[in-house]
Amino acid sequence: MTHTAQLAGEIIIQRPAAEVFDFVADERNEPSYNPQLVAAEKITSGPVGAGTRYRAETRTRGGRTVLMTIEITGYDRPRRLDSSTTLAMMDIQGTLIFEPVARGTRMRWSWQVRPRGLLRLATPAIAWQGRRQEQAIWASLKRYLEGHGPRPDPYQ
């Protein structure tokens, strides 16, 4: 039995690829479209790119908050974004691909979720829940970007 959950999917967002990439690459934007992410703080200096790290806090279904560290491990603007996320009970490696299409941007995601400890026994449930959660998060991003567009960050 494998203890890695594979999550993948795609969505079309009617905005230019560079705009979608830039908005998603800055993790501080995620609380505006992901209600489970209650806070995200950039903890490295300099512009967003490979090596940028964030401290974030997510809310579980039970209402607890969980801390995580997110690092951008690959940054090929505006095409590809790789990241590594560390939580107490799991590690997540991920890739986002941004492809210009006639109606905007096709964004593809692929995550490998590796639970630790006893949580490894729940890998199939984590995969099922994770797929649903990712679809909801990226659908919310689509609504946000198509409805409002990203707000410029006055502090950057």
Image: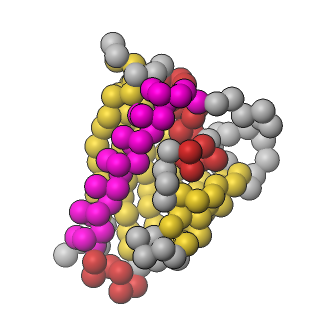
Image coordinates for residue 92, horizontal then vertical, percent: 44, 61
Of all residues, the one furthest to the left in this rendering is 1
Left or right: 153 in relation to 139: right
Report the magenta stretch's main SS.
helix
Depth check: give the residue in front, 127 or 80: 127
> At 63% across and 58% down in the image, what residue appears?
39
Q: Quadrant of residue 43?
A: bottom right
Left or right: 22 in relation to 36: right
Of all residues, the one furthest to the front in this rendering is 147
> At 50% across and 44% down in the image, what residue appears?
33
User: Where 35 sits versus 98, above or below?
Assistant: below
Depth check: give the residue in front, 139 or 92: 139
The question of residue 1 being in magenta is answered with: no
Image coordinates for residue 104, horizontal then vertical, percent: 39, 19
Image coordinates for residue 115, horizontal then vertical, percent: 38, 74
Left or right: 101 in relation to 152: left
Left or right: 6 in relation to 15: left
User: Where 128 sits versus 103, above or below?
Assistant: below
Asked if one can make out residue 110 in the rendered structure from this viewpoint, the answer is no
> At 58% across and 30% down in the image, what residue appears?
150
User: Where 151 sits versus 88, above or below?
Assistant: above
Magenta segment boundaries in residue numbering: 123-150
